[in-house]
Image (tube, helix red, strand yellow):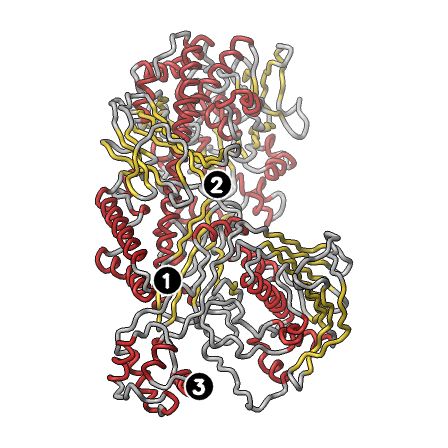
Amino acid sequence: MSSSRSKPKEDVIEALHNVAAEMHDKMLKGVAPTMTLPVRTKTNIGFDDRLGVYKYGKKKTVRDATSLGSARQLLRSLHVTEFIEEMINSGKSSTLREMYYISEAWGNGKFHSQNESNNLAEDLEIVTKCLREDFKLRPEEDGARIIGNVTFEERNRRGDWMRINCRDDVGDSGYGVPYNVESEKLRLVDEDIDFVMAIETGGMFDRLIENGFDEEARCALIHLKGQPARSTRRIMRRMSDEWGKPIVVFTDCDPWSFRIFASIAYGAIKTAHISEYLATKGAIYLGITADDILAYDLPSDDLSKQDTGALEAELSDPRFSSGWWQQQIELMQELGKKSEQQSLAKYGLDFVTDTYLPEKLGHPDVGLGY
Amino acid sequence: MSEENPPPGKQKQIAISEFFEKNKHFLGFDSLQRSLITAVKEAVDNSLDACEEERILPDIKVEINRLKGDQLEMISQDNGPGIPRGAIEHVFGKFLLGSRFHAIRQTRGQQGIGITGVVMYSQLTTGGKTSVISKVKEDSSAVYVDLGIDTRKNKAIKSGERRDVWIDEVTGEEVAQGLKIRTEMKAKYQRGRQSVYQYLRMTSIVNPHASISLVVRDRGGEVIEEGHWPRTTDRLPTVVKEIKPHPHGIHLGTLQRMLREAEERKMTSFLRHNFSGVSMRAARDILGKSELEESRQPRRIKAEEAQRVLDCFQKVKLLNPPTDCLSPIEDLLIKKGLSKAIDSRFASTVTREPRVSQGNPFQIEVGLVFGGDMAADGPIEILRFANRVPLMYQQGGCLLTKAIEAVDWKRYGLDQPGGKGIPKGPAAVLVHLASTNVQFTSEAKEAVATNEEVLEEIRRALLEVGRGLKGHLKKSSQRKKAREKFELINIILPEISKKSSEILDREEPDLAPVITQIMNAVFCEEELGWDSGRKLATCSITVFNYTARARAYTLLAKWPESESVRMEDNPLGGRKEARGLWAWRLDTLDPGSSATISFTLSGLSKGDWNDTEIFFRGNGDIIGANRIDEKLLEEMRNREALDAAVEEVQSKEDAVVASLSERVDYPDKIDSREGPEPDLGSLVIDQGVDE
């Protein structure tokens, strides 16, 4: 894995042209134009032994212009291609939302919702094996916050490299991770930590900071803000690769939190085409586990219908096929309960930093030798 | 109705107010909401009946104003013949018990006790009088009079009578003829399914020849509800003839009374003169089987002998009663009425042939409208009518509702949870039962009683409109698919071609083979329109061949052929295949080419014709048209030939009885010989081919 995965712009344009060429070639043959892309469901992701992450399998779906809906998609792809090419050539970039509004001028190729434009951008990434950064498309989504004794260099708008220590140079909200964390924008300069801890909720993140856990435990804390953005997952991956630091993940105990961990450790289904850039295969799930609910007698809520359905789906998700996960999911089904990170406050505000985390980090399964 | 024998003159008279009080539930005055509806109904029914008798196109205005407390003022005005001065107190002051019961024909005024009930209710609840203005054409001025009722003598009390010129308050012009009633009563105006508004809306549907309007004002004078239903046809309902009772529909009491009152000297003439459907031979046959001498005097027939005669009525073959005593609304007028009251996309109507059940002629009409702005998630709207009178209460217990529930609507494209009951969807179903003797479940006359023959007849009519709906839905979905395909190949595909060529800096490909590969079918699209300049209905049918092979077809189109509807322009010629079915032979269609047929029709109004059906002959299917079933077409032609022959016979024989028997028996003959009547709607053989 190179530290920069950006493609030269000629390659990007060529990849996009190949999409247009598939359509054009089909029409020359006298048949309906098509666009071929992998099936994007859990039935078509598989573990890539070489990369150590989950990737799309061989199942392909052909979108052909024999129905009005598909034909519109093809036309939109061409408009997007043209738009990206213009941006690449003029050195501009736009947000996905801006592209959605720009499509107003595309007549029959315009998008009817932002979801449509986001999905199509993903389609093109997958087909071309490029990244949306290559397409000069930015997400709206908020990157994570980091606090801890690590130092980055970020290139600012003026093009200068700016050195930032995430303990000394930032306020209480921490260092905000930019949407582009590739080496041309961000360098990992220095660190004095033992591990990186990713935290699901803002409340717990703030609690650990207030309790000084980053210094006490010699770690960098990352607030995931729910399902982590691509840049969040990417920066963790780089910290793992470039600094060789273990990544531990601390979330609620519910089926959706398990998916957050899976997207960090194995890759997300939606972005399985770039799992090898985003997923950190060695990431460790620290808690809260279903076992913890019992072991610490944590306050819990009943599983909702949606929760139960999600758990059931996870049992057949290849990313959760390991014995440990199967056991955790089954236990949770058995308990019919879920629990939040903050339920640890039952035993006082310091319980999480004084007792729970040290015990968990020191557990032989976690293997940090804490 | 024949149940309600008039009380013999000398019968002890109970105080009429007591009678009213005791029976107000079936007189329609049992609740404050219903009393108002009943009052409006009596006034409007009278107006409609009076106008119909005098062959006047009715203009009816109803006004309701809230007064203090729970009192209301109801005003109704018509342009009918008015009531001569001397008859006013009779019409408004007496319960019309018995005045109509000898005549057997279809009338509205068989419900309730007429307008007298309104005068009575007003007097009982407010102590007030009912003001009447009546103008007869021949008189130079109108009569103004206030009416009350002497409840002991069952008589009207007149007061303040005067004559004056009647100036209409709205137009400021003198009223040439008409009747205006103003009355106050304890009542409540209510919106919704059971409201005056709904009653008038339904009335307008089945009386498309009437213009009806409604204004409801609150105490302050502000309008809280308003309705205006203009007439959609200038054709008055046909005049109905009075007929004599048919032996199959008679009860012992009635027979005995008829015998008692008979003026005939011999039983044979009694039977022939007082009943319909009894010929000389039948009369002899009945008497022979009853072991009665033909010369017996009717007045001397004893009870057990009358019973024998009654039994033998069933054993003898009798002619059916004539059915021209019925006044159906007729297909097209129902369609107009429905589209006036309900804004919808599709309307299908059926008027069945008259039938006879237990000696009573009856006729079923149904209409179904679908789409438009009707609510899609609730049960369909059911519009029930008996002799052009809306039935608004007791929907669940009514035969007309049960008939709707007895249809498997899922087959026809309506949702029917659990496969039974009232279907759901954006639709309204109208059922009209016209009969000389509508049997109700109770005196309230709001629900039609169970009768297997009537039920079956309604069910068949519903199946017919259901088939129409199914065809419509299938066609809409086909049309939507075809539209999408056209957009795909005509707009999107060329843009894909242009854009991809620009991006790649290549030549644009030839799209013809691509289009053929995508479509790979022959499409047919028809468009019905209206040429307002020439007052012609227009139709154009275009066939596109998007296949790789040349195709040859004959296209056939359904059109509303009748004596008054003619084809005007028809540049392609073609020929008539059957009544209402025209055929054109098309030149060979090369791949990628299209052909258009167009024609115009005179004799229709705008909106009369909004649905046709296209059939074809030839190899390969056409999306948007159905392959014609030659066998059924042949049967149709045979039936037409038979029709023509029957008509010829009828015009030659003027003997009324002969022609009647011919006409009444005819549908049965067809039914028994050929099964279901072939009609254009079932000319399709491979229904599922394009689905």
- Give the residue at mark 2: A256
Q: Position of residue B251 (x, y in %)?
A: 39, 81
Element type at mark 2: helix
Work out how far the residue at label 2 is from the one at label 3, CA to CA, in angstroms.
Answer: 92 Å
Q: Residues within 10 Å of mark 3 (few under 14, many from 20)?
A: few
Q: Nearer the viewer, residue B659 or A296?
A: B659
Q: Nearer the viewer, residue A32 or B592?
A: B592
Q: Quadrant of residue B275?
A: bottom left
Task: Give the label, 2 or 3, closer to the camera.
Answer: 3
Q: Nearer the viewer, residue B67 or B183?
A: B183
Element type at mark 3: helix
Point 27% across, 33% down: residue: B621
> Disc 2 sits on a residue from what chain?
A
- Give the residue at mark 1: B354
Above-or-below relation of A173 to B405: above
Element type at mark 1: loop
- The answer to whether residue A294 shows anywhere in this view is no
Q: Residues within 10 Å of mark 1 (few under 14, many from 20)?
A: many
Work out how far the residue at label 3 is from the one at label 1, CA to CA, in angstroms.
Answer: 31 Å
Work out how far the residue at label 1 is from the one at label 2, CA to CA, in angstroms.
Answer: 69 Å
Q: Position of residue A362 (x, y in %)?
A: 48, 37
Q: Position of residue B111 (x, y in %)?
A: 53, 71
Mark 3 or mark 1: whose residue is earlier in sequence: 3
Residue B363 as seen in the image, left or right of residue A101: left
Mark 2: amino acid = Trp
Circles 1 and 2 on the same subunit: no
- Give the residue at mark 3: B261
Mark 1: amino acid = Pro
> Could you tell me if the residues under marks 1 and 2 are in contact, i.e. CB atoms within 8 Å?
no
Q: Quadrant of residue B586?
A: top left
Above-or-below relation of A183 to B482: above
